[in-house]
Image: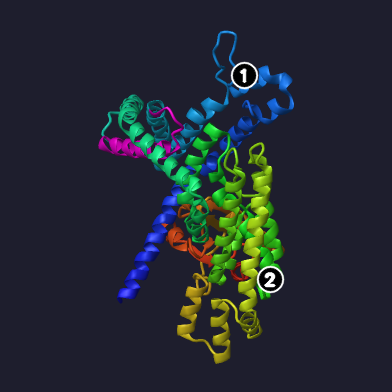
Amino acid sequence: MTAEATTATQQKGARVGVQRFGAFLSGMVMPNIPAFIAWGLITSLFIQTGWLNELFPGGAEIWSQLGGWALTEDGEAPTGLVGPMITYLLPLLIAFQGGKMIYDTRGGVVGAIATMGVIVGAGIPMFIGAMIMGPLAAWVMKKVDSIWDGKIRAGFEMLVNNFSAGILAMILAIAGFFTIAPIITWLTERLGEGVDFLVEAGLLPLASILIEPAKILFLNNAINQGVLTPLGVAQSEEAGKSILFLLEANPGPGLGLLLAFCFFGVGVARASAPGAVIIQFFGGIHEIYFPYVLAKPALILAVIGGGATGVLTNVIFQSGLVAPASPGSIFAILIMTAQGSHLGVILSVILSAAVTFAIAAAILLASRKKDLAAEASGANSFADAVAQTEANKGKKSEALSGLATQATGGLATDTRQITNIVFACDAGMGSSAMGASVLRNKIKKAGIEGVTVKNVSIANLDNTPDLIVTHQDLTDRAKLKSPEAIHVSVENFMNSPRYEEVVARLSNS
């Protein structure tokens, strides 16, 4: 193997590793997004500067009880919902989910108990601590159980299992109180100081240089769920809003890019762009514009420019969201926008879209003649090119058939019965859900029955699917989870020619 090939393999392995780490973090946070939204709505409505107290001050006594801010006759502040939810509920939900991912419900329970020690020991929202302690405690529980697995006398299983989990959870909670909590507190304070420095120095827009390419390569979950969301929630608790929730969720850059393709793109890219605009901007599924950038890598400059513009606008207007907006739909953004921040947030979306559109339009116009020539020449996907080459040859070729098998993920020659098709992405809820819906409709129109199509996260893949569809950047991870399935890679979940191949394969089986 050459040095170049070795380096490429290492880079690919590193990217897959970061993707898997980000997917694991996302797996802890994404199922609990409804809880974050609920907390964000409660915060925006019932805190002292919330909507209800500003619009209806006569109900302050009720709002204060829910928001936990006005002193009672005894001189004590009511507990309210805002503080306990962010301090205890949200971190414990994350810890339970992380533990469950490692060791099912038993791991979730132990992880939540152990995280309670970290929460109490820190005294600040412990999202990073929950992401560490939940899975760690579950892993330790799993290892401890393996020591006496199959060695417990009949009739004593429940006794041993319950007390071993309870004792270990107690020990880990105490350990978390004295060790993990101080470390995470120190780390959170340093990260917060770093963000404050970037904001005060006017350098926060430079974060787009890292965030926008990371989104395209599906590496954004490690940044968003591991750093931005925990720090953003802490900032929101203190200031009532955070700009960090907008660094990755702003739909403006994707909107500007897709609009540029609507006006200046060619072929399939231009034809599919209008539909992608609706899905990306209103549906909040940002993955829909990734293939457009991957098809013309120079466009990464456009989304970086747009992203930085949006961040700068929010810095100038000191605008932010009260809680994470997921998915990154304009509706979710506006609902989560803090009181007094709507002008800045709306302008950040508009200006980021405008800048991205301008840069993308210039790039597309500069290469328009070349793109039109390629389109006129009938350039198509790799699988179509192989098929056309074999047709030109006029007879079957073993070499080309093998190449076609690689191009179609095994569809060309695999004769297995396909009844269970799964679309997989990081979270299992966004782009994979759209792709599953598209293929499901195509199968229905073809009159094919007995085939199920569903969407899951890559972390939850197993060996039950017959065929798995993933974005080309995620296929390697999917193969590790389900090596026996047929794997199909696509560049665009909404408009891939590979779907026709799958339908044809089902029709012929």
**Above-or-below relation of 353 to 325:** below
Q: Closest to the observer: 144 or 474?
A: 474
State yes or no: residue 77 in magenta: no
Return the residue at label 1: 65
Return the residue at label 2: 270
**Image disc number at residue 317:** none
> Could you tell me the amino acid type at mark 2?
Arg
Q: Are marks 2 and 1 in contact (CB under 8 Å)?
A: no
Whole-percent x and y of residue 494? 64, 62
Under tag 2, what secondary structure? helix
Crowd band around label 1 with a 10 angstrom C-alpha radius: few (<14), some (14–19), many (20+): some
Q: Closest to the observer: 429 or 280?
A: 280
Q: CA distance from mark 2 to mark 1?
A: 54 Å
Crowd band around label 2 with a 10 angstrom C-alpha radius: few (<14), some (14–19), many (20+): some
Whole-percent x and y of residue 385? 56, 81
Residue depicted at x 30% and y 32%:
179
- Look at the magenta stretch and give its main secondary structure: helix
Q: Residue furthest top?
A: 74
Using residue 103 as the reference point, say whether residue 506 is left or right of it. Answer: right
Using residue 294 as the reference point, say whether residue 10 is left or right of it. Answer: left
Split into 4 quadrants, where in the image is the N terminus? bottom left
Region rendered in magenta: 122-149
Q: Marks 2 and 1: which is nearer the front?
A: 1
Residue depicted at x 50% and y 74%:
407
